[in-house]
Image (cartoon, helix red, strand yellow):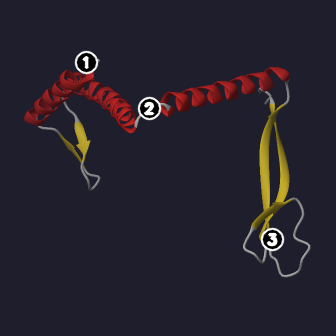
């Protein structure tokens, strides 16, 4: 049995044109003045057809808005140095996650290949493999376990 979608797609036609002053207009009717060429634009929007789906989407939008507002407030009172430190901390966190992932991959696989700048693949030698494990461990030790 096929499921039914709870969304409908509504399409509207708009016209985009630029007037003699260089101002771009978007209207539902083409320009009435002569000498203007309008580009027809089809705009689509999806609207839920049932109240539960509408409420779910509304709640998701509210959560996204609240998170964005919270983030703005969090950074609004920071000095430039605090913002730089926060950004550095986020970058280190991402790099730590990548180093841990790399270490897991290297530890679980004795044959690991990598892609060079030209797109060619090569397998790491035993020495390269051991060196990459050591590098990942050092990075994790130096940066990932710091508060």
Question: Position of 70 compared to 46: left or right?
Answer: left
Nearer the observer, 109 or 85: 85
Graded by Cα atoms within 10 Å as few (under 14), some (14 to 19) or many (20 or more), the crowding at tag 1 reads few
Q: CA distance from mark 1 to mark 3?
A: 60 Å
Say which residue appears at 79% left-offset and 73% top-offset.
19
Nearest to viewer (mark 1 / mark 3): 1
Disc 1: which residue: 145
Say which residue appears at 22% left-offset and 27% top-offset.
106
Graded by Cα atoms within 10 Å as few (under 14), some (14 to 19) or many (20 or more), the crowding at tag 3 reads some
Q: Locate residue 22: give its quadrant.
A: bottom right
Disc 2: which residue: 78
**Of callouts 1 and 2, which one flags the residue occurring earlier in the amino acid sequence?**
2
Residue 121 location in percent, x, y? Answer: 25, 46
Question: Position of 114 compared to 45: left or right?
Answer: left
Say which residue appears at 78% left-offset and 43% top-offset.
45
Q: State the SS at label 1.
A: loop
The numbered dot on residue 38 is 3
Residue 143 location in percent, x, y? Answer: 23, 25
Q: Is residue 43 visible?
A: yes
């Amino acid at each position: 049995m096929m499921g039914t979608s709870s969304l409908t797609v509504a399409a509207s036609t708009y016209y985009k044109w630029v007037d003699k002053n260089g101002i771009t207009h978007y209207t539902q009717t083409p320009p009435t003045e002569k000498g203007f060429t309008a580009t027809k634009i089809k705009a689509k929007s999806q609207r839920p057809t049932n109240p539960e789906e509408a409420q779910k989407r509304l709640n998701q939008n509210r959560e996204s808005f609240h998170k964005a507002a919270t983030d703005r407030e969090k950074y609004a009172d920071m000095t430039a140095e605090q913002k730089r430190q926060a950004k550095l901390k986020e970058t280190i966190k991402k790099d730590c996650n990548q180093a841990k992932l790399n270490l897991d991959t290297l530890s679980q696989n004795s044959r690991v290949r990598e892609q060079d700048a030209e797109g060619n693949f090569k397998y790491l030698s035993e020495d390269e493999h051991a060196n990459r494990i050591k590098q990942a461990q050092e990075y994790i030790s130096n940066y990932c376990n710091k508060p």
